[in-house]
Image (cartoon, coloured by chain):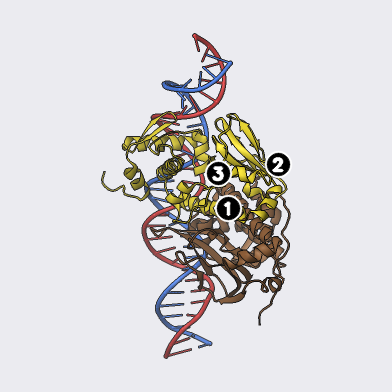
Chain colours: A brown, B yellow, C red, D blue
DNA sequence: CGTGAACTTGAGTCTCCTCAAGAACTGTGG
DNA sequence: CCACAGTTCTTGAGGAGACTCAAGTTCACG
């Protein structure tokens, strides 16, 4: 029933390939080996279900097996901020290490399955599997690098460029997982993309429309087809000279 | 010559107090104990000097002892992005773990001193001092939480509110180190603040002017005096009703 | 005391946001 | 299979906040 084992943690290798400098890629984590040390259970989620919510006690990390989720920071006053999208191989919840409770909502955007790695039990496993500890530390550091690369992007790019960068990021993450980088379905709505990119949903729509008008992409509702990868990349790097 | 030992890692307890939920505070790291395991040397920097630059090989972490530094992400095309400001007790360079080279410039904004913790030698020390490993992991996770809280702030607050939040953050970090939270000197220029807050330097100036006009603060060049902490906090939470 | 860098202030512009309406898709039940 | 409601997406018109450009002022440093 569940495609077990050999999930790699290689956390969003694709994203970093796009946005940050090259770096070593972490080796996969073997869930079967890990389950000898800690009680690993799989959890299934349907679209719209929460993996956990802000304020709940932090007692596990999660490794995404299948599906697609979003993480969403929530302030006391209700302001919301999508902080990222997670897919197969991504670790979820690591940013809560050292905190008593989660600060994020994590929501499945489609039917998903995750491995639950109890915390702090997983720490004991780390002590016995140094490579696991290393993997975790790398994942944390990579997350920081990714967040900061996005910060640079959001602060220096126009709305259209941000959306282009977002699509290229998704494309390379899909490719890293063996899916087509040129043709995929957005699992999230325009509003979620906007929150992540610091834009309003109307602006996301307009940017997609303009990119389509330039022949870079084809947009059919949530179905995206990248027609000219180089042109998309060119948009980001300001080659908007020739009309 | 150097005020040794008992530097705490409690990384920016203040910042998190302002921006994120409460959480446990990491205990201090004892440099003297640590130096039994790894070769810890102190490095001195004068204002304007680089601790390291983007592209240089990653071979050490740094613990700030005295002074004030900024970290600055640099893209290949020259775009720059201030990612944070570091003071006593902050760990610098942890985001480069797992990468071959640094992606950031780190520059001293005043005369500063840091402990250099060679990497990966420090990993072996971690294996022998589990609390050190824990401290490092916590610092990484806290960094992610801090970055994301700022992302939420930047995406949902106006220029004036962002500057107010920035001042309050600095204030509480100063307080956590035993300095006055109401009276301090900005070590960085308006342009650096702007880069960090996703604003232009003129906009930072105007925001400071407006906050001063409201009686929240007093600004004398880089010298800041917070006259009404509550009012400053009120600015962030939208209490701009009564004229 | 002079030079250069940093800061301030103003006027005008532009990008993105706000508000609002309409269209397309989803899925539910008859 | 179709109609309907609800959600999501699209598109437009108008406005606001931050940016750009430019000049003047203050400060730091030699």
Q: Name the one closer to the observer, A155 or B129.
A: B129
Q: Earlier in the sequence, mark 2 or mark 3?
A: 2
Q: Name the one closer to the observer, A19 or A214.
A: A19
Query: How many numbered badges does the structure rendering display?
Result: 3
Tell me, yes or no, if residue B146 can be seen here: yes
B151 sits to left or right of B164? right
Pointer 3 residue: B90
Which mark's residue is nearer the viewer, 3 or 1? 1
Q: CA distance from mark 2 to mark 3?
A: 22 Å
Residue at mark 3: chain: B
Indicate the quadrant where residue B104 lies. Answer: top right
Spot occupied by residue B224 in the image (x, y as percentages of width and height) = 40, 33
**Residue at 59% over, 30% down:** B48
**Badge 3, how many Cα within 10 Å: few under 14, some, many 20+?**
many
Spot occupied by residue A138 in the image (x, y as percentages of width and height) = 66, 56
Name the secondary structure under disc 1: helix
Q: Are marks 3 and 1 on the same chain?
A: yes
Name the secondary structure under disc 2: loop
Spot occupied by residue B204 in the image (x, y as percentages of width and height) = 45, 37
Q: CA distance from mark 2 to mark 1?
A: 27 Å
**Badge 2, how many Cα within 10 Å: few under 14, some, many 20+?**
some
Residue at mark 1: chain: B
Q: Earlier in the sequence, mark 3 or mark 1?
A: 3
Task: Reply above or below: A159 against A125.
Answer: above
Q: Are marks 3 and 1 in contact (CB under 8 Å)?
A: no
Pointer 1 residue: B135
Tell me, yes or no, if residue A231 can be seen here: no
**Residue at 66% over, 71% down:** A37
A78 sits to left or right of A132? left
Task: Reply above or below: B242 against B51.
Answer: below
Q: CA distance from mark 3 to mark 1?
A: 12 Å
**Badge 1, how many Cα within 10 Å: few under 14, some, many 20+?**
many
């Amino acid at each position: 029933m569940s495609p077990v084992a050999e999930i790699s943690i290689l956390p969003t290798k694709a994203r970093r390939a796009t946005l940050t400098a090259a770096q070593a890629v972490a080796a996969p984590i073997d869930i079967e080996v890990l389950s000898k040390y800690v009680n690993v259970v799989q959890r299934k989620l349907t679209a719209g279900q929460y993996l956990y919510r802000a304020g709940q006690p932090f007692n596990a990390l999660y490794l995404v097996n299948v599906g697609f989720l979003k993480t969403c920071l929530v302030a006391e006053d209700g302001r919301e901020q999508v902080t990222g999208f997670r897919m197969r191989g991504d670790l979820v919840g690591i940013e809560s290490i050292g905190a008593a409770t989660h600060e994020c909502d994590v929501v499945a955007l489609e039917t998903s399955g995750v491995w639950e790695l109890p915390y702090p039990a997983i720490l004991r496993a780390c002590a016995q599997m140094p490579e696991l500890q290393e993997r975790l530390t790398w994942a944390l550091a990579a997350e920081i690098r990714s967040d900061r690369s996005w910060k640079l992007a959001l602060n220096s790019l126009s709305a259209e460029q941000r959306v282009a960068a977002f699509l290229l990021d998704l494309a390379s993450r899909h490719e890293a997982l063996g899916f087509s980088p040129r043709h995929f379905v957005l699992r999230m709505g325009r509003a979620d993309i906007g929150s992540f990119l610091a834009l309003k949903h109307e602006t996301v729509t307009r940017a997609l429309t303009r990119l389509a008008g330039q022949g870079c992409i084809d947009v059919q509702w949530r179905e995206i087809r990248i027609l000219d990868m180089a042109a998309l990349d060119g948009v980001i790097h300001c080659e908007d000279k020739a009309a």
